[in-house]
Amino acid sequence: MARERLSVVVTRRLPEPVETRLSELFDVRLRDDDTPMSRAELAAALKDADVLVPTVTDEIDAGLLGQAGDRLKLIANYGAGVDHIDVATARQRGILVSNTPGVLTDDTADMAMALIMAVVRRIPEGLAVMQKGDWQGWSPTALLGGRLAGRRLGILGMGSIGQAVAKRAAAFGMQVHYHNRRRLRPEIEQRFEATYWESLDQMVARMDVLSINCPSTPSTFHLMNARRLKLMKPDAVIVNTSRGEVIDEHALTRMLRSSEIAGAGLDVYEHGTNINPRLRELENVVLLPHMGSATLEGRLEMGEKVLLNIKTFEDGHRPPDQVVPSML
């Protein structure tokens, strides 16, 4: 007798090959339009499904988990970050949580370097001149940016993505510095010719470019607060491809407006899509709509990990990418 297929609910539209494979393997309910589920829709999904496949746009908090049905046994997150899921409460209720680590390292590092280059070389400003039809020809003093080679890059969070950023930055001739919860092994430091700073304050005060690559945790919330942002040099720039809440966005906006910081490149925001309108008005800021993971290859690999986590769980084994509270 055939085993009953797992009931799987997917909260957002996923790449077509991923949705097709999910449909082949499981009793899956897919999303028709590419909009986030409402809280009521999420609650209904948690009541009915064996497995929920959410994304970063779904806030799975203790209140929602309290409404979960007895069937729900796995939350197979489509994405590496799980700060939108109350992992501790899920564990208490006997619900496993998995994610998709490692597949977006190169994509996110590429975007960090793209933002560094865009801000330092003032690429969006040049693009705006061309799109408006205002270009009057080459000028020796127009849109002068800076040279990347020789600049000090401070990486906040030297995990896999931070190291991938360091590799790229070193190829551009930048001097790599970093702050991390734990110092890296000497051979890794030597690979990037990286300088470790135990004091984040001391590193921030000396860098030309600061790249945020740490995860979102209670200890990293507003890690770059107003006091620490004020330590940055007036000609320094900051880029963030990690999580928006690591930076105090209000303080950053105020300092960019007053030229206390030279520029910023942001792919993530403290309040999601509710971006400070004053931040959007600034010419020395490059804003992107959370595109760090937006490669077809990366999104397909994320889907493959979700499928593997669900299939392994279905077979009675621990999902290979299970997340537990002690990891956070």
Image (cartoon, rainbow, N blue to C red):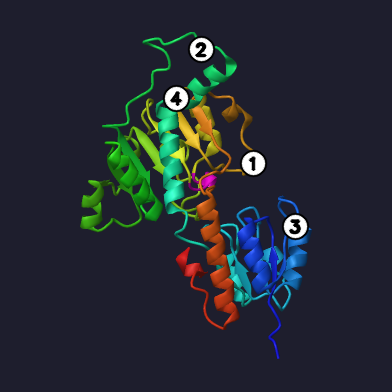
| 242 relative to 128, above or below | below
Residue annotated with mark 2:
135
Q: Which residue is mark 3?
A: 39
Give me the C-alpha separation between circle 3 and circle 4: 41 Å
Q: Let me know if residue 65 is in the magenta part.
A: no
Q: At 46% across and 66% down in the image, what residue appears?
A: 327
Task: Please state if 14 lies on the left or on the right of 202 as rendered.
Answer: right
216 and 102: which one is in front? Answer: 102
Question: Which numbered dot is residue 122?
Answer: 4
N-terminal of the pair, mark 4 or mark 2, is: 4
Circle number at residue 282? none
* Number of marks in the rendered image: 4
The residue that disc 1 covers is: 273
Q: Residues within 10 Å of mark 1 (few under 14, many from 20)?
A: few
User: Label 2 sits on what residue type?
Assistant: Trp
Identify the main secondary structure in magenta: helix
Q: CA distance from mark 3 to mark 2?
A: 49 Å
* Mark 3 / mark 4, whichever is N-terminal: 3
